[in-house]
Amino acid sequence: MKKIVFISVFLMGILGSLSAQMVIFEGSFDEAMKKAKEEKKDLFVDFYADWCGPCKMMAEQVFTRPEVGEYFNSRFICVKVNVDAKENKELAKRYNVTALPTMVFVGRDGKEMRRITGTKDPASFVKEARIAKGEALSFEQLYEQYKKKKKDVQLSRQLLLEAPTFVSAQQGYDQQKWIARVDNLYAEYMKNNKLDHMITEPDFMILTMYHAQTGKKDPVFDFVAANFDQYAKVVGKEVVAGYLMGLNNSYIIRLCKKGDLSYKDRLARVNGDLQKVYAGISFGSLSVQDAVTLLADATYSLYRRDEDAFFKNMNKYFAGKGDQADVNDYTQPLEDLFTAYEGKLSENAYSKCIPWIGKALEKKMDSGLRTRLLIMMGQCFQHTGQTDKAKQSFNQAFLTSTQIENKMMMKQLQQVIKQSLENL
């Protein structure tokens, strides 16, 4: 009896999970259309190919979500169409499928209602379906409403929150047009709003989206910093700290690269009004102030072509951070160094990079990054006269590259490796 009950519960669990996801009609487009007419539903057509990674991602991570299945199964007959199949070529042409993934909402009359190109998260995906069904307004329709009610704060907020997803799906002139419109919308929103009224989760999201850079005089940055505790209650301390640190650190780096010594004034804020912001960060035996100062001084030295000072500051940073140093701690200064010198380092610099790369390779990372670091190691050995070690690094890089999932990236890196071996 217990076994029967267990099996029944087990089967109910399986059936429940299956019914919660999008039900895919097994049959042709024409057969799906016939069923849609019988059930008085519309069609959702997923144009895909077996080689399309984003198509698989949508099928495995979005179509299977309960909220997606609940909405789509009650309103659409969902069918998948393989664009590589000979019998589907004409259908793909009819619906102008030029990129994958392309998903088209089709009415029972065969006319396109709306389409999605590219991937979507579950919430955005359902939103697109609701727009197709006329249950929600499209971004363009909302914008038309906004033009008549520019002081409607709630409408402006909704547009600003939805804009990144919409604009990223546009191309060419249309994208540039909407970028300009959204920039003006944000400026108008900030003009009509008081910062005192913006300590909310949606408004913080808007600031992170559109206020992505700070400067010497920045009332928005200063307001969020002064109200750190209030924002932390709304969105979480780590989120607010991450936003402010990102802005502040980026500004310091920009000043350093320009050779502007006022970066030291900005550094002083780390132990001043931004002390709470940086409080949760650990740099081993280094204080936060010392760690950030070493990184800033290193960057300043690098762009003043003071190679020795750059390595001295970075090595102090690595020694202080110790085992807490992660792969990004090593790869960022390496990238900065090669960028600043346009890939033409001195023999001394190549020599000093070798232990950094060695430390980085001890960390966990994906195959693509490991391959690039091994190539860089090979170049360092090559330019310091260590040909055998260079060859060994390049060969190791080639073996590692075979594990890269992105085949285009794999081929590009392998071409670089082959060229490097030929130049030894």
Image (cartoon, rainbow, N blue to C red):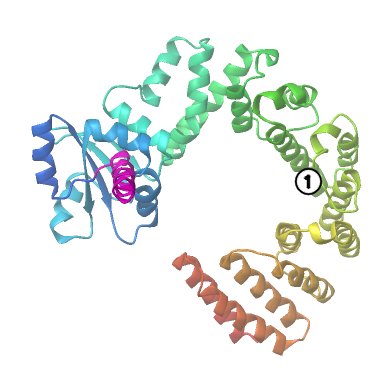
Q: Nearer the viewer, residue 218 or 280?
A: 280
The residue at 9%/45% (across/down) is 31
Outermost residue toward the front in this view:
1
Magenta extent: 1-23
Residue 179 higher or lower than 410, as above or below: above
Q: Is residue 311 above or below residue 8?
A: below
Q: Is residue 397 magenta?
A: no
Callout 1: 10 Å neighbours few (<14), some, many (20+)? some
Q: Residue at x 63, y 20 (%)?
A: 200
In the rendered image, is residue 218 in sight?
A: no
Q: Is residue 244 left or right of residue 47?
A: right
Name of the residue lying farthest toward the bottom: 388
Q: Secondary structure at mark 1?
A: helix
Report whether 47 appears left or right of 380: left
Is 87 on the left-hand or right-hand side of 421?
left
Q: Quadrant of the C terminus?
A: bottom right
Residue position marked by numbered label 1 in the rendering: 253
Q: Which residue does the image show at 60% across and 28% down from the upper left?
A: 205
**Residue occupying image coordinates x 47% and y 28%:** 162
Residue 269 quadrant = top right
What is the quadrant of residue 214 in the picture?
top right
**Which residue occupies the foreground of this view, 210 or 173?**
210
Task: Return the x and y of residue 91 as percentages of the image width and height.
Answer: 16, 49
